[in-house]
């Protein structure tokens, strides 16, 4: 089943009063729009994402909308919500079996709710996420005696609705659902609904008007729509809860390994320190196994490839390069991807000479290259007990592990 997600981000946030569109405001350090788009880009059932934004933003979209592993399109929105959705639908792949639409202003939608909405629409043609009413529901009418009431009781009229509304009846709460997004539709159902050309606050309303049945999928109370500045307070609380859970569960680990031959006439550079030795490590750069193993561990923890990919040994830029510089570059690379190095731990395996007296200098050099305290850099030296190539003194090797933490 091919699924296209449409993110409706066409609003200019006029109700919000902020200096810029509300979908670009930060919650827990991340833009609302980036959170909403990522929920769909990362979803295994979704194949492409189309974002409808105000024209001026669509022409110069933020960096997180410029590259993605899945097809990601940005289109200009229209004057009304359904115009924006229609523009996005027009740009979407014709292969779509289901189109799922989501408000950019609902950044906390869960992967589970997205999946249930898509699956239900695939089976029934149309599905809307909605939460059952928890409060008793009153239908209200305008009070014909309001002019008299306002004169008599000024305080009662100070609420936002004024004193003009009175209860006409109490509805059966079990029949009341409050619609959210995602809302998902088979493409022919959505096409017919948009073709009506009438205004509505959501797509399900249009589909209902075509006579197509819309299935309700139980929504989530945390799937709030950020509409007014007061909602930001609740949003920060939801983000804080979710992220403290993420931070403790999803620290990232990476491992690295390196080995270089030992030959006469080369310097022996280990952990950024030149160790006095008759023989040294053979390689294109300074052949520092400790720096190379740590570099791979850091890149690995961030899923950013490996040292050979970023610093190829046939590239003249890295000939004779200090491997401390490669380590600094790799640290910068993962920082750009949102990661910070927590600590590194290394085991060097070398038969001779003994490294014991150089460990402290190595730790300082590595810590400076990564930009962390030396208390977070551990280096241990071992021999191979005379066994194998390393034991015969023909090679030096290192194993490293790095812990990374994702920036907020
Ligand atoms: Mg190497």
Image: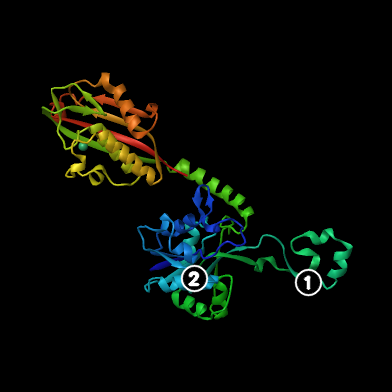
The residue tagged 1 is 142
In the image, residue 203 sits, relative to residue 195, either above or below, namely: above
Residue at image location 47% in from the left, 55% down from the top: 34
Number of numbered tags placed on the structure image: 2
* Residue 122 visible in the current orientation: no
The front one of 296 and 219 is 296
Mark 2 closeness class: few <14, some 14–19, many ≥20 residues within 10 Å: many
The dot on residue 201 is none
In the image, residue 363 sits, relative to residue 55, either above or below, namely: above
SS at mark 2?
A: helix
Residue at image location 54% in from the left, 80% down from the top: 197
Give coordinates of residue 270: x percent, y percent. 23, 28
Give coordinates of residue 319: x percent, y percent. 18, 39
The front one of 269 and 134 is 269
SS at mark 1?
A: strand
Q: Does the CB distance between marks 1 and 2 fall below 8 Å?
A: no
Residue at image location 86% in from the left, 66% down from the top: 149
Q: Quadrant of ligand 1?
A: top left
Q: Is mark 2 within 8 Å of ligand 1?
A: no
Quadrant for the N terminus in the image: bottom left
In the image, residue 273 sits, relative to residue 226, either above or below, namely: above
Cα separation, mark 1 vs mark 2, equals 34 Å
Mark 1 closeness class: few <14, some 14–19, many ≥20 residues within 10 Å: few
The dot on residue 85 is 2
Give coordinates of residue 98: x percent, y percent. 43, 70
Q: Quadrant of residue 280?
A: top left
Give the colour scheme of this rendering: rainbow
The front one of 285 and 100 is 285
Residue at image location 41% in from the left, 71% down from the top: 91
């Amino acid at each position: 089943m091919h699924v296209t997600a449409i993110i409706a981000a066409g609003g200019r946030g006029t109700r919000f009063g902020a200096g810029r569109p509300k979908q670009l405001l930060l919650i827990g350090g991340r833009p609302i729009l980036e959170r909403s788009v990522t929920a769909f880009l990362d979803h295994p059932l979704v194949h492409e994402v189309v974002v409808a934004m105000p024209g001026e933003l669509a022409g110069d979209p933020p960096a997180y909308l410029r590259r993605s592993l899945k097809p990601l399109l940005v289109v200009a929105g229209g004057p009304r919500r359904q115009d924006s959705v229609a523009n996005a639908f027009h740009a979407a792949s014709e292969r779509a079996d289901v189109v799922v639409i989501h408000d950019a202003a609902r950044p906390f939608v869960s992967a589970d709710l997205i999946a249930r909405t898509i699956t239900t629409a695939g089976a029934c043609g149309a599905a809307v996420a909605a939460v059952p009413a928890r409060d008793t529901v009153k239908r209200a009418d305008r009070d014909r005696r309001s002019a008299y009431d306002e004169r008599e009781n000024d305080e009662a009229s100070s609420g936002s609705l004024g004193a003009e509304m009175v209860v006409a009846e109490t509805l059966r709460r079990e029949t009341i659902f409050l619609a959210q997004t995602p809302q998902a539709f088979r493409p022919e159902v959505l096409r017919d609904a948009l073709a009506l050309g009438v205004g509505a606050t959501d797509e399900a309303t249009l589909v209902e008007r075509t006579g197509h049945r819309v299935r309700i999928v139980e929504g989530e109370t945390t799937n709030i729509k950020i509409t007014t500045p007061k909602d930001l307070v609740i949003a920060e609380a939801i983000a804080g809860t979710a992220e403290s859970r993420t931070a403790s569960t999803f620290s990232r680990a990476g491992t690295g390994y390196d080995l270089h031959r030992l030959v006469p006439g080369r310097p022996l550079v280990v952990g950024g320190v030149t160790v006095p030795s008759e023989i040294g490590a053979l390689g294109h750069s300074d052949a520092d196994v400790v720096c190379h193993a740590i570099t791979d561990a850091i890149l690995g923890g961030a899923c950013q490839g490996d040292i050979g990919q970023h610093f190829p040994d046939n590239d003249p830029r890295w000939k004779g390069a200090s491997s401390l510089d490669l380590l600094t570059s790799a640290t910068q690379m993962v920082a750009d991807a949102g990661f910070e190095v927590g600590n590194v731990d290394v085991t060097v395996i070398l038969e001779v000479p003994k490294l014991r007296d150089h460990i402290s200098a190595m730790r300082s050099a590595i810590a400076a290259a990564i930009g962390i305290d030396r208390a977070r850099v551990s280096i241990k030296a071992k021999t191979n007990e005379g066994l194998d190539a390393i034991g015969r003194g023909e090679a030096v090797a290192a194993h490293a592990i790095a812990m990374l933490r994702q920036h907020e």
